[in-house]
């Protein structure tokens, strides 16, 4: 059995359409939407609306952790526009392309920049959306936990630690623990380019210690200090940033 895993697709529909080639299934761990590419400030919903110079400025403020200034700058740009309606329209356009690129079968969960309420409109037969749920593939049990934890970035699908922990708990014992965000380990949560720690989950880490899955697979941190490490019996693997690499991670057994 061979499964390909991707995360942090961020608008890369071209490579996504090829990501399942040679595999029995594709797993996608979220962040289909591209709002702003921190490596190329000309790509995404934000620069399409406000230009590259304004994208440069907001990235500069966020990288310096001046989040309140970044929010105020953003509010000034959105003045006079129906922010929610504009973003929703742009997200819908991206979702049409992303979901059309999914092969059959695909098993997917949400990232922190995704809009879960829209997914039922675009998930075609052959795409199974899972969050706090488990499936069996080739004799292994895969558990899925979508979304991110609350942060100063205030991305669309951030939830409380308690709500997230409840989803992890609902999985029980699994062979492969699939999530968008990593377990709360410094080496796995630090982004070397953004120069900050992203939020990881203590509940995921506790589940790894308690249930000892074979794998913990995740994305979210685009340029991690460590892409792969062991926690006891569990191999922890960062499978992103697919938008930049265009290459899926392969799991064979």
Image (cartoon, helix red, strand yellow):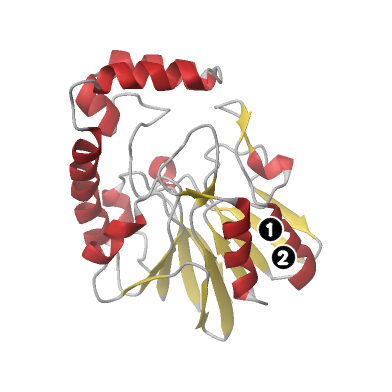
Q: Position of residue 241 (x, y in %)?
A: 47, 44
Name the mark on residue 207: 2
Q: Position of residue 67 (x, y in %)?
A: 50, 22
Name the mark on residue 155: none
Q: Nearer the viewer, residue 71 or 245?
A: 71
| Distance between mark 2 and mark 1 Cα atoms | 6 Å
Q: Secondary structure at mark 1?
A: helix
Residue furthest toward the right? 232
Please state if 61 lies on the left or on the right of 19 as rendered.
right
Q: Are marks 2 and 1 in contact (CB under 8 Å)?
A: yes
Residue 190 seen anywhere in this rendered image of the structure: yes
Residue 55 seen anywhere in this rendered image of the structure: no
In this view, 204 is above or below 82: below
Give the class, few, some or many, for how many residues have Cα within 10 Å of label 1's Cα (few <14, many ≥20). Answer: some
Q: Residue at x 49, y 74 (%)?
A: 2
Q: Residue at x 69, y 70 (%)?
A: 214
Q: Which quadrant holds the C terminus?
A: bottom right
In this view, 252 is above or below 54: below
Q: Quadrant of residue 232?
A: bottom right
Q: Quadrant of residue 156?
A: top left
Please state if 222 lies on the left or on the right of 190 as rendered.
left
Q: Nearer the viewer, residue 171 or 247?
A: 171
Give the class, few, some or many, for how many residues have Cα within 10 Å of label 2's Cα (few <14, many ≥20). Answer: many
Which residue in the structure is indicated by mark 1? 203
Q: Nearer the viewer, residue 161 or 219?
A: 161
């Amino acid at each position: 059995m061979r499964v390909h895993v991707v995360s942090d697709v961020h608008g890369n529909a071209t490579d996504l359409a090829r990501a399942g080639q040679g595999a029995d299934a594709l797993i996608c761990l979220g962040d289909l939407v591209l709002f702003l590419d921190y490596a190329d400030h000309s790509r995404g919903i934000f620069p399409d609306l406000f230009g590259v110079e304004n994208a440069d400025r907001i990235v500069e403020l966020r990288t310096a952790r001046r989040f309140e200034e970044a929010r105020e700058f953003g509010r000034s740009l959105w003045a006079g526009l129906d922010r929610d309606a504009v973003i929703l329209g742009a997200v819908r356009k991206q979702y049409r392309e992303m979901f059309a690129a999914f092969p059959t079968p695909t098993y997917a969960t949400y990232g922190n920049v995704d809009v879960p309420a829209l997914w039922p409109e675009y998930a075609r037969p052959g795409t199974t959306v899972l969050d706090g749920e488990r499936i069996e593939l080739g004799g292994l049990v895969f558990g899925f936990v979508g979304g991110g934890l609350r942060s100063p970035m205030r991305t669309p699908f951030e939830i409380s630690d308690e709500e997230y922990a409840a989803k992890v708990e609902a999985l029980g014992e699994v062979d492969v623990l699939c999530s968008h965000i990593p377990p709360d380990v410094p080496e796995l949560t630090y982004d070397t380019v953004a120069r900050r720690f992203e939020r990881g989950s203590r509940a995921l880490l506790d589940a790894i210690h308690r249930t000892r899955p074979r794998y913990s697979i995740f994305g979210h941190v685009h340029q991690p200090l460590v892409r792969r490490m062991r926690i006891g019996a569990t191999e922890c693997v960062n499978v992103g940033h697919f938008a930049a690499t265009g290459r899926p991670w392969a799991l064979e057994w």
